[in-house]
Image: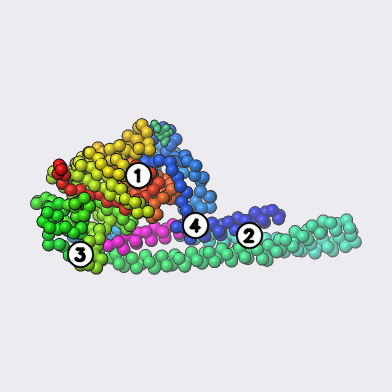
Amino acid sequence: MKLLLLLFLCVVGTLAQVEYDDYEGEAKKEPKATVDPRGHRPVSRGRETYSSGPAAPPPVSGASRYRGRPTAAPVGKVKVEKEEYPESGGCTHMSEKMGVLCPTGCELKKTIQKQERNVKPTVDQLKRSVDELTQSTNSIYGYVMDMTAEVAQRQRVTEGNGMLVGQYTDSLETQHAYVKDAVDVTFPQNIKILQAVLEKIREKIQRLEKAVTTQRAKCQAPCKVSCPIPVVSGKECEEIFRKGGEDSQMYLIRPDPLSMPYKVYCDQTSQKGGWVVIQSRMDGSVDFGRRWDDYRRGFGNIAFDVGKGHCETPGEYWLGNDRISQITKMGPTELLVEMEDWSGSKVYAQYEQFTVQGEATNYILAVGRYSGTAGNTFLDGATELFGENRTMTIHNGMMFSTYDRDHDKWIPGDPSKQCSKEDGGGWWYNRCHACNPNGRYYRGGAYTKYMAKHGTDDGIVWMNWKGSWYSLKSISMKIRPFFKS
Ligand SMILES: *[C@@H]1O[C@H](CO)[C@@H](O)[C@H](O)[C@H]1NC(C)=O
């Protein structure tokens, strides 16, 4: 009996603690450093489980936190995980041809709603636990009452029998006292703790609901970014630079005289300027887990005005595959990829040759002539890997893939083997990547497979610099006409 009770109380104790931590301490938890290189999807059997490596499985009661992690995905699993993919962020583009995009507040809405979804089951579970506990407290209370009666009865019976039964009665009384104490003191205490936790979570949900409502209201009307358009414009940033537009900021460019001009951020400072920024990540404010059409048209925020009267602060965006392709087809184009880690170190990768084919061929990527300090992920693949494991991470020559249009080299036709679904963004995935600039944004850098949605290295990864399990603070891709110097 004693043992049973102790066990029960222990379970209750841990329940209260773990569930509480689960919600409160999410951000505080120090990620376990995992160093095994990922990125590739090896051909050998059994590796689809991602269960190799030294990290221990998460504690059972905390498992809800890792809901997205595939637990030893069975081979031949055909069922596609039902996944909610974000739409345009609750914002309508004001005028497509102008490339006007939304402020970041609307992105927040989805994040909050996602959190809300995760917390609700926890609260339900907690409520059930409290109910169960109350019930068992009642039944134990009944049991104690019976026992009390029995003790009294026995005391009457044993009067006269004296020493013989005395010993038995003593032990019965001790047990009785113990159980009574548990029922009177310990159980109510535990229930109180649980109720306090429940109340706290309820409060938080209320606050979240309020925030969601506010965001919903804010995102009802189309969002506007008010950036005055500079007087200087041109075919592209390089021409703007030559015309005297030497400040890095948002400009209007018109690479194709037959199409409408559009807004873009020109980097006029790096390596003598003239760069059209085609991709930018810097704070995780824009969701990059988007469908094909979004990647084709472009999405995100070109730039912000921070009070100086012009938009000199770039936002997070993807210029759009059609536009990128169109610019690279105008003539020899070079690519500069600049990145920074969370301690402020910066490296770059440069390709003197960069071409993206049109949509008809799914935007095939071609790069050439690397130089730089970040590592040649596009042409060499991940240098931590060897043999075919490495070649399957080379990006050069790949088609573009999004979660709704799979053109990667990982078992084509198998919906459970799609790089873009697992690695977070649209990209020129092979099987799968050595770099993942459109992946998920993880604050602080280091992350683990338990934090990843599918247990894969889905962060903003540049393997040849920081490995699979480090997500960069910022990265940008920019292009300009290539001139032989
Ligand atoms: C490829 O990767 C798998 C698992 O990640 C490993 O077992 C295998 O030895 C690797 N092959 C080479 C050639 O390194």
| Disc 1 to disc 2, C-alpha distance | 57 Å
| Residue 429 position within the rendered picture, expressed as x and y whole percent measured from the top left | 30, 41
Q: Dot 2 corresponds to which residue?
A: 136
For the record, the magenta segment spans 101-119
The quadrant of the picture occupied by the C terminus is top left
Q: Amino acid at mark 4?
A: Asp
The mark closer to the camera, 1 or 2, is 1
Mark sitting earlier along the chain (4/3): 4
| Disc 4 to disc 1, C-alpha distance | 32 Å
Q: Dot 1 corresponds to which residue?
A: 465
Residue positioned most to the left: 257
**In this rendering, would 46 be left or right of 318?**
right
Q: Amino acid at mark 3?
A: His
> Which coloring applies here?
rainbow
The mark closer to the camera, 4 or 3, is 3
| Residue 37 position within the rendered picture, expressed as x and y whole percent measured from the top left | 40, 40
Which one is nearer the viewer's eye here, 208 or 286? 286
- Residue at image point 22% right, 67% down: 308
Mark sitting earlier along the chain (1/3): 3
| Disc 4 to disc 3, C-alpha distance | 44 Å
Q: Dot 3 corresponds to which residue?
A: 310
Q: Amino acid at mark 1?
A: Trp
- Residue at image point 15% right, 62% down: 230
Do the numbered discs 4 and 1 sit on residues whose CB atoms are within 8 Å?
A: no
| Disc 2 to disc 3, C-alpha distance | 67 Å
